[in-house]
Image: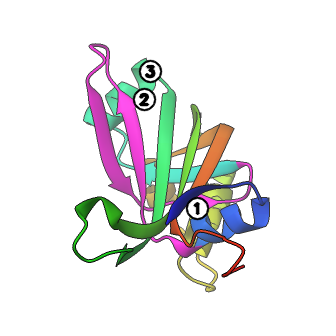
Amino acid sequence: MRTLKITNQQEIDEVIRSCRTCFLGLSDENNKPYVIPMNFGYDGQFIYLHSGQDGRKWDIMKMNPKACITFCLGEELAWQNEEVACSYRVKSKTVIAEGIIEFIDNDDDKTKSLDVLMAQYSKAKFKYSKPAIKNVGVYRLKIETMEARNFGAKAVTPWNS
């Protein structure tokens, strides 16, 4: 089994859109890492997130907007030889996006961002009350780099290709 780099943008987008949770990685002023599971929306250029407008995550993002978001799809255990520990692998596909957090303050832009986020989970059209829009913190990761991997891919050899 091999680890292969995924370079096809359509396959990368498919991994992201198949996930229900992403993991937001931040680093505080003491370089202490902080990683939290989040709901998200994705439009190909940005990853949209939302939360309350205070707390540890909010404070870290305001102080250091550099962030990393990880997606992981698949949890199938596989092995080449049941008796060889080093041959075990969890078959999965991952995407890691790095970039800068941008805060969205305008109500119309918040609504559009929440629509992108909700489209990840439902085809329904939603309405948001003014207090809900006012009280939610909406932000997005402007993707600067993105890498994807396929872990546990079947090795291609002349006899199985």
Q: Residue at x 49, y 38 (%)?
A: 68
Q: Position of residue 155 (x, y in %)?
A: 59, 68
Q: Secondary structure at mark 2?
A: helix
| Distance between the alpha carbons at the discs numbered 1 and 3 | 22 Å
Which residue position holds label 2? Answer: 61
Q: What label does residue 64 carry, if any?
A: 3
Q: Position of residue 50 (x, y in %)?
A: 46, 52
Q: Residue at x 31, y 48 (%)?
A: 36
Q: What label does residue 146 carry, if any?
A: none
Q: Residue at x 63, y 85 (%)?
A: 123
Q: Earlier in the sequence, mark 2 or mark 1?
A: 1
Q: Earlier in the sequence, mark 1 or mark 3?
A: 1
Instruction: Give the vertical position of 155 relative to 143 (above or below).
Output: below
Name the residue type under label 3: Asn
The stretch in magenta equals 18-45
Does residue 42 appear left or right of residue 63 in this picture?
Answer: right
Name the residue type under label 2: Met
| Distance between the alpha carbons at the discs numbered 2 and 1 | 18 Å
Q: Nearer the viewer, residue 52 or 83?
A: 83
Instruction: Give the vertical position of 119 relative to 151 (above or below).
Output: below
Whether label 2 touches label 3, CB < 8 Å: yes
| Distance between the alpha carbons at the discs numbered 2 and 3 | 5 Å
